[in-house]
Amino acid sequence: MAKIVLGMGVSHSPQLSTPAETWAAHAERDRHNPEIDFEAQARTAPDWLKDHLTREVWEQKYQACERAIAEMGRILQEVSPDILVVIGDDQKELFLRDNMPAFSVFWGKEIYDLPQDVEKLPPSIQPAYWARHGVVPEAYPTEPNLGRHIVETLIHQEFDVSQFTEQPAGRSIGHAHTFIRRRLLIDQPMTTMVPVMINTFFAPNVPSPKRCYDFGRSIRQAIESWDSDQTVAVIASGGLTHFTIDEDLDQRVLTGIQNKDRESLITIPRERFVSGTSEILNWIAAAGALEGLDMDVIDYVPTYRSIAGTGCGMGFVVWK
């Protein structure tokens, strides 16, 4: 039977892939984000926040993130699993308003990373394009047999999961999945992938943390019951809290995963999973899939970028 030999959780924010001198541009984007009450948050900001907003501190945090990504890439190369099951959210990339499934699994033979129009991206995100998409289409090899087995197992476990084998015309696999290729597998051959998508962003069918944890457990059952001797890594892509950083919530998630405290994870109030913070649901699903492994935190870096407390809680963890 197949065996899970590695787990990972990694943030994929564009801020990770842009140098410190561009972080002020990210902060300016936050100022105009309708999901952020920027002025109110700035008025009530704690005094210590100013210490996080110097160019020197930004550079230190940028370098810390770079080291963490490099270490995760090194571990992934060292373990060298045969297949990556990547759990991520789709932000109107493969799925639009014509169909927005709560859970979905792709089980075709390959899926494409398609070039995007850089000029349509906000100016602060354009420098991070290299970590999202290429300049020519790239085929990602996928494992249809495991993908189908995951779907069948999920249905048997009473998850009404969406499944597809054909990529919608003109739509690219999303940046939650391409980030793994472009940052963790940089300069390495592409490892076969099974893309798994959770709708964390778009109401009204965002699943609860309990549902996501149990979804991950079913994925583990599928992998471990698949009649193959191949090795598998399960990777959660996205998070942690953003666009407003909440270090307490980030630490609750990291501690809950490390202690295998399912109750702490599944009782996080659903209203906390707003905007980019919702990507923590990908981590909770991975925690369900990786209960049998021990998690270590490589680093946690709260990359504050404005006086309103905006930024991203960058998390980098490994299950072994």
Image: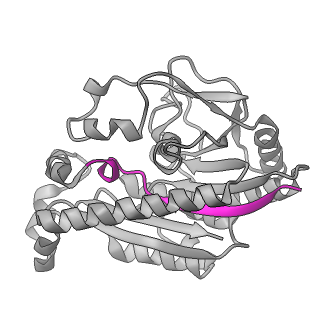
Q: Identify the image quadrant of residue 105.
A: top right
For the question of whether residue 52 can be seen, the reply is yes
Whole-percent x, y for residue 221 in the image? 81, 59
Q: Identify the image quadrant of residue 299.
A: bottom left
Height in image: 313 above or below 293? above
Q: Please tell me which residue lies in front, 285 or 206.
A: 285
Q: Is residue 12 magenta?
A: yes
For the question of whether residue 45 can be seen, the reply is no
Whole-percent x, y for residue 268 in the image? 49, 71
Instruction: Residue at 62% x, 67% y: name it.
Output: 287
Q: How many marks?
A: 0
Going by the image, does 171 lie left or right of 128?
Answer: right
Going by the image, does 245 lie left or right of 265?
Answer: left
Q: Which range of residues does the magenta coloring cover?
A: 1-18
Q: Is residue 4 magenta?
A: yes
Instruction: Residue at 44% x, 39% y: name it.
Output: 91
Q: Please tell me which residue lies in front, 146 or 274.
A: 146
Height in image: 316 above or below 192? below
Q: Quadrant of the N terminus?
A: bottom right
Whole-percent x, y for residue 45 in the image? 13, 71
Whole-percent x, y for residue 13 in the image? 36, 51
Q: Quadrant of the C terminus?
A: bottom right
